[in-house]
Amino acid sequence: MAEAVKVLIIGSGPAGYTAAIYTSRANLSPVLYEGIEPGGQLTTTTDVENFPGYPESVTGPDLMAQMRKQAERFGADIRSGMVTTVDLSSRPFHVVVDGTTEIKAETLIIATGASAKYLGLPSETKFRGQGVSACATCDGFFYRKKDVAVVGGGDTACEEASYLASLCRKVYMIVRKPHLRASKAMQQRVFNTPNIEVLFEHNTAEVLGDESGVTGALLRKNDGTEVKIDISGFFLAIGHHPNTEIFRDQLKLDAEGYVKVEPGTSKTSVEGVFAAGDVRDPHYRQAITAAASGCIAALDCERFLLR
């Protein structure tokens, strides 16, 4: 027998937890499944300095633990598990968790976030977890006083390079274009850090390594010449893709796969299904905007159920 729930929240970052806080305070008894990464991407960051109310900053994991606790305080039922299939063809929606647990949900709030992109090189896959990482703040510690490289030229890449520069001996930034895409402030930070070297107009041809892990990278310049750098860590910072695979062909998505919502709301193309956080936001991707959209989704959901 499938369990019946009023509000099912999929995902557990700032968007999911905020939606759980609001819907539980509205006595809607939400059930939230945390997914593959409990707490979302924020659990992979160190200090969060721009979340209002924390003048001395707060770590990502601490902030997520507090949001989770707050949701539970108001009665949210937070469970570990991953939603594996959904059927949005009729209400209540039919959802399967971990391939076995069946749930019938009157409404659905999607807060599945977005995941880091990789270059797609076989050598990159081979050394993933052995020197190849998409999270400097999770893994930077292992490369203390060593040489590393960061791929990318946006704000995230500059942020990761700056963080790594505080730990590592040298940080190479591998940038495809002849310029950085990052904001002026972030560019300034990079150019003012003596142990960051920006390699403009370079692409990664191959990640090099042996049984101990990454030992270097073979780079190809835009003019076709190749150069080898000696590094112990190879960090990706080239963007994200939304975690919407299970909703494909059931919800309207944009060209990049982000969930489309009605402007000014969290309403998706299916009545009773709402989206919040990075899964619908390719532009801002901040903890505060994700939390705000979780609040919007919860209020939209509550109004929908009151109709």
Image (cartoon, rainbow, N blue to C red):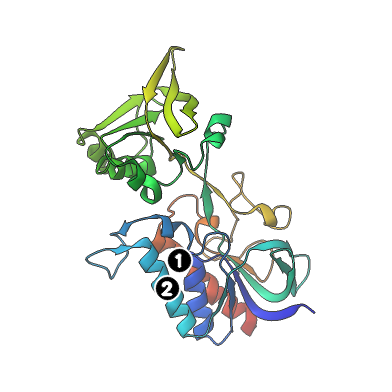
Residue at coordinates 72% horizontally, 81% vertically from top-left?
4
Residue 241 located left or right of residue 18: right
The quarter in which the C terminus is drawn is: bottom right
Disc nearer the start of the sequence (2/1): 1
The quarter in which the N terminus is drawn is: bottom right
Residue 208 picture location, percent across and down: 47, 26
Mark 1 lies on a secondary structure that is helix
Residue 58 located left or right of residue 305: left
Residue type, label 1:
Pro
Are there few (<14), some (14-19), or many (20+) residues within 10 Å of tag 2? many
Residue 123 picture location, percent across and down: 54, 30
Q: Residue furthest front?
A: 211
**Which of the 4 image quadrants contains residue 173?**
top left
**Residue topped by disc 1:** 14
Are there few (<14), some (14-19), or many (20+) residues within 10 Å of tag 1? many
Mark 2 lies on a secondary structure that is helix
Residue 67 located left or right of residue 262: left
Above/below status of 200 relative to 226 = below
**Residue topped by disc 2:** 67
Residue 25 located left or right of residue 154: right
Residue type, label 2:
Met
Q: CA distance from mark 2 to mark 1?
A: 7 Å
Q: Do labels 2 and 1 touch, CB within 8 Å?
A: yes
Residue at coordinates 26% horizontally, 40% vertically from top-left?
165
Residue 179 picture location, percent across and down: 35, 28
